[in-house]
């Protein structure tokens, strides 16, 4: 894969990524708001730049949505955890602890402090990763067996620009941020990647197969765009 960095007025830094096997231009924005345009290896960079400029308004809207909400005491994180902040004037620095059902942040500062929020997000990601590695392998295995879509391997990673992927070797990778989604959308992402074990592209055949497993797939795909792979209070 070849990448090229450009600065586009009104958008900011943009990564242009050429990859063999890519057929279409694909625009994505990660959790930090960085813009990436995936493109076929044979297409000139100027075409990708024009593509991004044409979608400047959409990019600006998504970057606003990407702004992280302040985490507050008592919010739920993932499926099993609750976040708790404790202010202790005698504490030396910011301490974090994650157990089976709670994320504890203790510090001499207010919960809205920038570094307290940063530490809370790191601890919350630890909780999400633990949940994902406990729950997702069983769910993927179950849906794979139920629908007859075998895969070679499952990997759980920190994906911030997509919810999952599937390689030509049938290796499925899922974002641990999936644990922030409703169960219906988690299953949709898993089924989406399982169907990719037979259809690597998003051809009509792919959507027909996915619709059989997840009726209303296009509506679910639209719904999931309202969510971002990041720590999000529930």
Image (cartoon, helix red, strand yellow):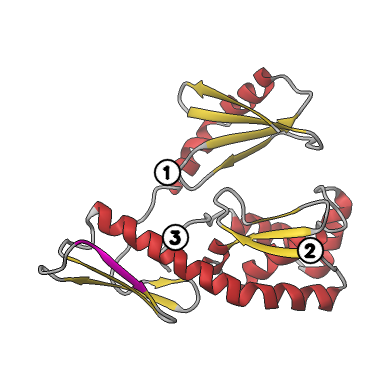
Of tags 2 and 1, which is closer to the observer?
A: 2
Q: Which residue is mark 1?
A: 64
Q: Earlier in the sequence, mark 2 or mark 1?
A: 1
Residue occupying the far bottom of the picture: 100
Residue occupying the far front of the picture: 92
The x and y percentages for residue 175 are: 59, 59
Q: In percent of the image, x 52 and y 45: which residue is there?
A: 30
Q: Earlier in the sequence, mark 2 or mark 3?
A: 2
Q: Secondary structure at mark 2?
A: helix
Mark 3 burial class by Cα count in 10 Å: few <14, some 14-19, many 20+: many
* Residue situated in front as seen by the camera: 212 or 92: 92
Q: Which residue is mark 3?
A: 231
- Calculate the distance from the C-alpha at mark 2 to the C-alpha at mark 3: 25 Å
Of tags 1 and 3, which is closer to the observer?
A: 3
Q: Is residue 196 magenta?
A: no
**Looking at the magenta stretch, what is its main secondary structure?**
strand
Give the residues in magenta: 93-97
Q: Which mark is residue 194?
A: 2
- Calculate the distance from the C-alpha at mark 2 to the C-alpha at mark 1: 32 Å
Residue 226 shows in the view: yes
Specify whether 205 is left or right of 31: right
Specify whether 218 is left or right of 84: right
Q: Secondary structure at mark 3?
A: loop
Q: Earlier in the sequence, mark 1 or mark 3?
A: 1
Quarter-wise, where is residue 26 in the image? Answer: top right
The x and y percentages for residue 181 are: 55, 67
- Calculate the distance from the C-alpha at mark 1 to the C-alpha at mark 3: 16 Å
């Amino acid at each position: 894969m070849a990448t090229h960095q450009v600065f586009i007025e009104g958008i900011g830094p943009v990564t242009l990524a050429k990859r063999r096997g890519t057929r279409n231009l694909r625009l994505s924005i990660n959790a930090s708001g960085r813009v990436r345009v995936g493109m076929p290896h044979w297409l000139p960079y100027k075409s990708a730049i024009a593509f991004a400029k044409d979608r400047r308004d959409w990019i600006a809207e998504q970057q606003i949505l990407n702004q992280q909400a302040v985490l507050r005491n008592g919010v739920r994180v993932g499926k099993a955890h609750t976040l708790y902040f404790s202010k202790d004037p005698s504490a030396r620095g910011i301490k974090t602890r994650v157990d089976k059902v709670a994320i504890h942040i203790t510090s001499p500062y207010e919960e809205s402090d920038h570094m307290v929020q940063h530490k809370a997000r790191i601890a919350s990601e630890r909780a999400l990763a633990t949940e994902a590695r406990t729950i997702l392998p069983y769910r993927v295995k179950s849906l794979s067996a139920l629908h007859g879509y075998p895969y070679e391997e499952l990997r759980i990673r920190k994906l911030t620009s997509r919810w999952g992927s599937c390689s030509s070797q049938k290796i499925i990778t899922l974002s641990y941020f999936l644990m922030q989604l409703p169960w219906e959308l988690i299953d949709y992402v898993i089924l989406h990647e399982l169907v990719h074990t037979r259809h690597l592209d998003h051809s009509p055949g792919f959507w027909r197969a996915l619709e059989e497993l997840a009726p209303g797939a296009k509506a679910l795909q639209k719904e999931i765009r309202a969510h971002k792979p990041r720590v999000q209070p529930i």
